[in-house]
Image: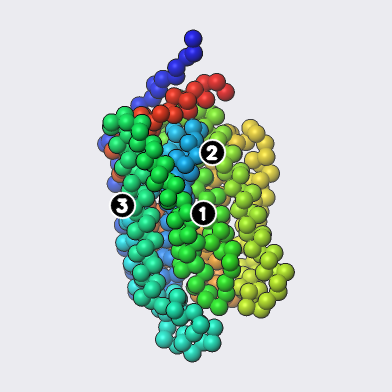
């Protein structure tokens, strides 16, 4: 007779937790300080804000893809951590509001937004796409699409908990099947708009995949640290076991390799073609101190995680995963900084206290929204048809 595993942990995040309030407080202080920074140096404010905005939005978008992949592949391993990803995507529409400062700073951030761009022989050929009106319309489409799928997947999952209607998994797969190709297109174009067009003379046909690769690699450290944070507070200690942590570590390892492959492929193609309008982008980022960030990316985002995570035991070693996760997230921020900031200051690294305040401000809002929702519902989808199978995996391995 087979043993049917049961959950002995409480599945409710403490309703009286002060974590959301503390995070929103941190976010408010960070954003207020950033506004002060705007009046001191508007250009620095908008560039710093864009870096932090891209950092946190990339995590939400990666969570959206993870949820859709879970449903379309009928995965079992990810059931216990899926609610965390669903909570990240429930409030993607809020980032449309937080995108407003970037719209207000178009002239500070993007050269193509200036009237003088029409006199540029290259930009004048791109004006049908790179103009303020169409840019605004595209952002409405992106956030409308992401917000729709994020809301539907989150609410339908909660509805399945309430009704115990396993038939809703068919609806969730339909949403996911339609959402994945749409997601691929929108995240590629969003990366073109937000990041690549900041240096409008340069282009890369691989940039959309490159942006996805850096985002999805950084997503797994967030999930790992979130699991450790919860278990550190005595939550889900007997539910999320070593095998589930191993799975997160394995995905972290897999996308470390994928990231390195895509990043190097983009560099190699541009290096091999040796076209001035393409190589100049890397030239600006391989001189005047910027090259040290590139060395950090190579060392701490690929070489060390790759070597360490080759070991099977490292994939569920808490100390190792914590150190690697924090390191990769720091380098993820540094890589976004390395892509964007040379446009503001090509010959020096323009690090400013506004970089810190915008990061803390948006980070406080990001995680404050997460925990506000997370404590309202079960931390695990208790009526998922694959829950018992996922739990059994932890008992049998």
Q: Is residue 208 above or below residue 244?
A: below
Give the crowd class for mark 2: few <14, some 14-19, many >=20 residues within 10 Å: many
Q: Is residue 74 left or right of residue 270?
A: left
Q: Which residue is mark 3?
A: 25
Q: Which residue is mark 2?
A: 248
Q: Residue at x 66, y 78 (%)?
A: 276
Q: Is residue 183 above or below residue 87?
A: below
Q: Is residue 261 left or right of residue 389?
A: right
* Residue 141 on image: x %, y %: 37, 63
The mark nearer the N terminus, 2 or 1, is 1
**Disc 3 on helix, strand or loop?**
helix
Q: Residue at x 39, y 38 (%)?
A: 170
| Residue placed furthest toward the bottom | 119
Give the crowd class for mark 1: few <14, some 14-19, many >=20 residues within 10 Å: many
Q: Residue at x 55, y 50 (%)?
A: 217
| Residue placed furthest toward the top | 1
* Residue 71 on image: x %, y %: 45, 40
**Disc 2 on helix, strand or loop?**
helix
Q: Which mark is residue 215?
A: 1
* Residue 353 on image: x %, y %: 44, 65
The mark nearer the N terminus, 2 or 3, is 3
- The residues tagged by marks 3 and 1 sit, at their Cα atoms, a distance apart of 27 Å
Nearer-the-camera pick, 149 or 119: 149
Q: Which mark is residue 377?
A: none
């Amino acid at each position: 007779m087979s043993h049917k595993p049961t959950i002995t942990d409480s599945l409710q995040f403490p309703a009286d937790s002060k974590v959301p309030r503390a995070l929103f407080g941190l976010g408010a202080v960070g954003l207020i300080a950033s506004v002060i920074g705007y009046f001191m140096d508007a250009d620095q404010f908008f560039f710093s804000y864009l870096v932090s905005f891209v950092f946190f939005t990339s995590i939400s978008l990666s969570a959206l893809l993870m949820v859709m992949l879970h449903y379309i592949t009928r995965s079992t391993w990810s059931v216990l951590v899926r609610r965390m990803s669903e909570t990240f995507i429930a409030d993607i529409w809020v980032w449309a509001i937080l995108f407003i400062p970037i719209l207000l700073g178009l002239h500070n951030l993007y050269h193509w937004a200036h009237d003088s761009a029409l006199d540029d022989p290259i930009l004048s050929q791109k004006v049908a796409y790179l103009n303020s009106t169409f840019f605004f319309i595209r952002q409405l489409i992106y956030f409308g699409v992401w917000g729709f799928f994020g809301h539907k997947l989150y609410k339908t999952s909660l509805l399945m908990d309430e009704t115990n209607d396993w038939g809703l998994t068919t609806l969730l797969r339909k949403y996911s099947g339609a959402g994945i190709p749409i997601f691929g297109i929108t995240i590629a174009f969003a990366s073109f708009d937000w990041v690549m067009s900041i240096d409008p003379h340069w282009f890369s046909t691989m940039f959309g995949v490159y942006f996805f690769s850096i985002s999805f690699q950084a997503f797994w450290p967030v999930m790992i640290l979130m699991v450790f944070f919860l278990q550190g507070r005595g939550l889900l200690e007997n539910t999320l076991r070593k095998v589930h942590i191993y799975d997160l570590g394995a995905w972290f390892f897999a996308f470390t390799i994928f990231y390195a492959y895509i990043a190097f492929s983009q560099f190699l193609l541009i290096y091999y073609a040796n076209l001035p309008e393409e190589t100049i982008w890397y030239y600006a980022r391989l001189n005047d101190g910027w090259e040290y960030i590139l060395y950090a990316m190579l060392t701490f985002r690929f070489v060390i995680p790759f070597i360490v995570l080759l070991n099977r035991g490292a994939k569920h070693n808490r100390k190792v995963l914590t150190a690697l996760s924090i390191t990769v997230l720091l380098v993820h921020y540094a890589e976004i900084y390395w892509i964007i900031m040379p446009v503001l200051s090509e010959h020096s690294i323009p690090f400013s206290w506004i970089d810190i305040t915008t990061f803390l401000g948006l980070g406080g809002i990001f995680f404050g929204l997460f925990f506000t929702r997370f404590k309202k519902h079960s931390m695990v989808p208790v009526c998922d048809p694959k829950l018992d199978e996922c739990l059994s995996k932890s008992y049998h391995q």
